[in-house]
Image: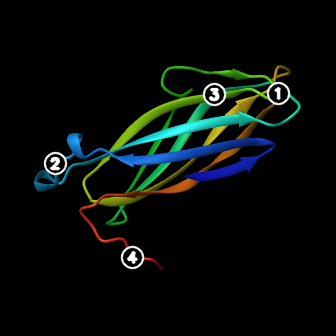
Amino acid sequence: MYSETTHGITVTVRPVFLEDQSAPAENRYVWAYFVRIENGSNRTVQLRSRYWHITDARGRVQEVRGPGVVGEQPILAPGESYEYNSGTPLSTPSGIMRGAYQMETPDGARFDIGVPAFSLDSPHEAVRLN
């Protein structure tokens, strides 16, 4: 699992390779990722938008921006958490993702929180530690 805390809000991500949805012979590799957002701050926040920076094993970058996550813009009071899962395909057997969520307070102040960089690893490529 990967975790990052920004402004008292912790984002934890757990990626899982989906063998049954992948087709290595066709250069199609698919991952699910499970996200938990915990509001450890003393203010209520709403997740307004997301940003993803996805890099495959060849260094190709895809950027994704959009409102909310999985069609929702959850509101988190202090101490509350929100969980969702989504997925991403790549044409290479490994990659890395990182991102950010834009949050908004009830008075309209907006700020970004980091989503930790997380590794997308499949059993179709040996993992090399740097």
Q: Earlier in the sequence, mark 4 or mark 1?
A: 1
In space, the residues marked 3 and 1 are separated at their CA atoms by 12 Å
Is 59 or 41 nearer to us in this picture? Answer: 41
Q: Position of residue 60 (x, y in %)?
A: 35, 60
Q: Residue 1 vs residue 48: left or right?
A: left
In space, the residues marked 4 and 1 are separated at their CA atoms by 40 Å
User: Circle 2 — which element?
Assistant: loop
Residue to which mark 2 is pinned = 23
Label of residue 78 in the image: 1
Answer few, some or many: residues within 10 Å of disc 4's Cα (few below 14, many 20 plus, some between 14 and 19).
few
Q: Earlier in the sequence, mark 4 or mark 2?
A: 2
Q: Earlier in the sequence, mark 2 or mark 1?
A: 2
Q: Position of residue 111 (x, y in %)?
A: 75, 38
Q: Residue 64 vs residue 101: left or right?
A: left
Amino acid type, residue under disc 1 in the picture: Pro
Amino acid type, residue under disc 4 in the picture: Arg
User: Circle 4 — which element?
Assistant: loop
Answer few, some or many: residues within 10 Å of disc 1's Cα (few below 14, many 20 plus, some between 14 and 19).
some
Tell me which residue sits at (48%, 25%) in the image.
70
Tell me which residue sits at (86%, 28%) in the image.
43
Residue to which mark 3 is pinned = 82
Is 49 or 28 nearer to us in this picture? Answer: 28
- Asked if the residue under mark 2 is in contact with the one under mark 4, i.e. CB atoms within 8 Å, the reply is no
